Image (cartoon, grey):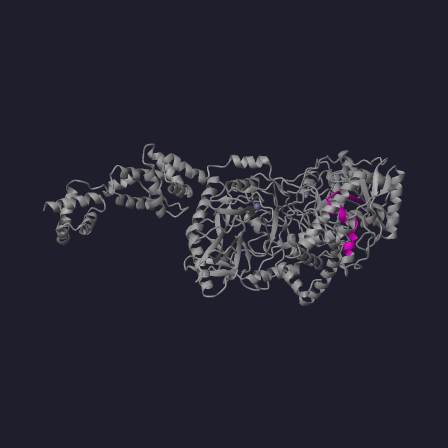
Amino acid sequence: MIELEPVIGLEIHVQLATRTKMFCGCEPVFGEDPNTRTCPVCLGLPGALPVINERAVDFGLRLGLALGCELADRSIFHRKNYFYADLPKGYQISQFDEPLCSGGFLDGVRIHRVHLEEDAAKLVHSSASGRIQGADSSVVDFNRGGTPLAEIVTEPDIGSAAQAREWLSLLRTTVKSLGISDVSMEEGSLRCDANISLRPVGETTLGTKTELKNMNSFRFVEKGIEAEIERQRELIQSGGTVVQETLHFDPRSGSLTALRSKEEAHDYRYFPEPDLLPVAVGPEMIKAAQDSLPELPAARASRYEDDFGLTAELAQRLAFNGDLGDLFEATAAIRGAGSDAKLVATWVNGEVSSRVEEGSDQTVEPEALAELLGLLEDDKITTAAARGILDTVIEQGGSPAALVESQGLEKVGGGDELSAAVDAAIASDPEAAAKVAAGEQKALGPLVGLVMKATQGRADGGEVRALIISKLAGS
Amino acid sequence: MIDRSEVLHIAKLARLSISDEEVDVLAAELSGILDHVEMISKLDLAGVEPSAHSVAQTGWLRPDVPHESLSREKALDQAPATNGEGFEVPPPGSGS
Amino acid sequence: MSTDITKLSVTETVAAVAAGDISKANLHATWLDRARLDDLNALSWVADRVKLGGEDGPLGGVPLGVKDLFCTEGVPSQSGSKILEGYLPPYTATVVEALTEAGAPLIAKTHQDEFAMGSSNENCAFGPVLNPWDRGRVPGGSSGGSAAAVAAGLVPWALGTDTGGSIRQPAALCGVVGLKPTYGSVSRYGMIAFASSLDQAGPITRTVADAGLLYSQMTGKDPRDATSVEHPDSVEPVVPMDLTGVRLGVPEELTGEGVEPGVREAFEATLDLARSLGATVAPCPLPHAPHALSAYYLIAPAECSSNLARLDGVRFGLRVDPDEGLDGMYGATRAAGFGREVRRRIMLGTYALSSGYYDAYYGRAQRVRTLISQDFDTAFEDFDAIVTPTSPSVAFELGSKTADPLSMYLSDFCTVPMSLAGIPAISIPNGLSDGLPVGFQIAGPAFSENRILGIAAALEDGLKFDGSPAWIA
Ligand SMILES: [Zn+2]
């Protein structure tokens, strides 16, 4: 059987956090009452005209610079013509053959282009099933319509679903650090579509691709792409051919459904937007964008290596996921110079990242994490207890020290409590005790387990083992 | 020349319902106009840049400063169908 | 005062108001009475009373007729279309607002060809406008209502819009003055668009001085129109220019074949007048001008096919819903709401932009446009202005060209090149041919409005055109 490799390209829409919309002065506010943030321009009323938001262009330039793109000195907006209820003018103002930024590179993936456009409005389908097909009528809310978007298109340089997720996470971090978007997948200010095809390993020509639309979390990006890769693999290996189509991934069922068939191929009739003149990107605009650039993730990673002595891999893991990087830096700062930054890094990368979904608000505050790691480092609590406390703090907040106090989670060590627990364990499993006494190390496990259970994880495993051995050796 | 199938395709793109008789009339009229405008195909346009505009060649940008939006009542005032909060449209999925 | 104030030019009226000889109340009442005499179907709406505002502005309170396609808050703005019948916009066009502020309040809206597509006003969904010189004939288009209303003395002055000749041609056919300004010098915000890269608002008046006066209050960069620019000159009150040494170019391409003999005679006579006033007149090549009409009839429909996509039955205007889903509603609404000519141009424009044809049609047309602009640039190195007849014919009979869209399109032959180049051009009354008005067109480089108004005023003085036969008694 031929070995197939996936080839993935991403198209990412980032809602820009300008104050006003792309082409009018309306202020989009998330969650506002429907149709209270509109004007003749964003309602597409007869006679209204678009005017380009300066800050949106600035944000686009910042993004281009951060992604190493070439910035156009003259950029043109085009009309993309099609009819849909969420599109008031019958065309979307977007960019076509002269985008703001082109070329570029981010962590092994080439950027094809970055361009600016306006967002569609929101179409609410009022039917019991919530599906478009069965709806009786639909209602349009134009509040979101016209919000500036930057569309980032990559070359097909991504080789796996996991890489797509990681890369998207790096992109999110990069955009967030630029301060140009909230980049929340949940609220839709970061949206990702993927173009996926398979080809025999060693081939260079691309196979027929499908487009996977609007996966609204990092996890779904990975699961959706994974599912589509598998679908295509099975199809090809059973002798079928992939059809070019747009698919929707349902995260609940894990199924993929086709959105549009190809015979309804669009003819967008792009032409230069006659209501707008070309944008001249002058040196002042580029300089302003350059001056506003923050430390980018790659620079941040090498700083972590230099300043904190982290390994390259760990430094990158934290720096490329901005939330983790921020938490790491803040926690390390609270703990102060001289403390063990590697412990913080390991905990943030391991224990915290496995518990917190990227971009989620339910996370641990740096103060709490610093306190927790302080308790651990001072040997006040065991690692097992620390994990439990982290769970509680992420779920409910609160101070780790107070939790240790109120729930009696302090490490049991040396004293009578541990000795009594060991005695109880030996007494309750004489068989295992006999084996240990006979030198069979494997039999230690059940005894240690009993002690840990009795002390609710507050005892140190090594200490328990040593104590058991010494007690049994003496018997 | 534009034939019937092209007329139907364009009418669909432009969202214009047209009657069967109108298809033939439009095919003839559009073909006549295109025959006339066809004369520009004889011009040598090598090296000539297209002009989307005549006078100003680059534009200016708008400061990111909010204006007052319309009230919802005003926004919905002229709409053929609303539910009081938004613009009602027929379901996108059904029909042809 | 015993003078009939409606017989004064606006410039004279403004002076009389300033001198206290005419009260504003009298001015408004008199003109409301005039507007109510409309039996030409020129007006689509007449105010109950003229609202005051901007009293002390330079336009003296002289009320203004405004083409239907300008959005006026709470006042029907239908662009001559059934799809916008009774549409009441929530805002007012920048230029109408500016003129109100400057002392020219709205008195009436005027009928037009649907979405400004037409040269005869027969494409108006609310019936054709009649030419006051001969009610069996068209007033020209698309600003035919404005031109007829000014010619018949229903309004003192009016706003029109010009995309390929829509101010100049009806002005010529109705015997009034029409100025199409430099593209970008007047805001398009609130003008219901036909072809965005060509549309431009301008004055339709009885005298050249009035046109200059109205235009002087229309120009300026509008923060709501990204294609608008500040006029580099201030627009001065019009004084007839001394034509001594003024070089007038006559492009053979626009003055030869296709121009009616009577129109040509009137044109030649005015060239003689210009010579007698000291101007030099010489042939001036515009080699690509014969291709202008072809380029125009690709560019304008392409832009309109997209501009009119917003007429979709969702947020305003007509909706026809045959219960066949969203696309069914779109198709039925647009089929019922748009007239034949509009549907034809939407189809043509959609075709010109569609996949596989863009380069051959729209792309080529945009390149031809470049060549036409270059022709004018070259011509203005040797000439101060270019002159042509405004329309190759006088007003034609109602119904005589409706069956053949191409013959109608040819009416724009002399006016379209300037539109593509974005340069200003003015049409002034140039006598009569068989009792019907003829127009004389003067075009200059971008932003040369002061110059072409001055030349026009000098010729106007010499021509002494009498527009009174069109006046509704
Ligand atoms: Zn708006």
Instruction: Work out whether residue A264 can be spotted.
Output: yes
Quarter of the figure with the N terminus of chain A: bottom left
The image shows residue A404 at horizontal and vertical percentages of 25, 41
Q: How many marks?
A: 0
Which residue is more in the foreground, C53 or A63? A63
The residue stretch that appears in magenta? C408-427
Indicate left or right for A431 with A378 as reference. Answer: left
Q: x and y percent of residue C441 in the render?
A: 81, 45
Judge whether residue A415 is colored magenta.
no
- Depth order, front residue of C83/A355: A355
Residue A27 place in picture, x, y as percent:
53, 43
Instruction: Name the image quarter holding residue C228.
Output: top right
Q: Quadrant of residue C462?
A: top right
Q: Is residue A54 left or right of residue A384?
A: right
Instruction: Give B43 or A380, whichever is nearer the viewer.
Output: B43
Residue A279: give x, y in percent of width and height.
61, 42
A321 and B87: which is toward the camera: A321
Write the residue at 30% across / 39% down.
A373
Report the side of A365 relative to A273 (left or right). left
- Residue C422 part of the magenta-drawn span: yes
Q: Residue furthest front?
A: A202
* As drawn, C359 above or below A105: below
Find the residue positioned furthest to the left: A475
Outermost residue, top side: A337
Do we see residue C161 in this rendering? no
Relative vertical location of residue B25 with respect to residue C139 in this rendering, above or below: below
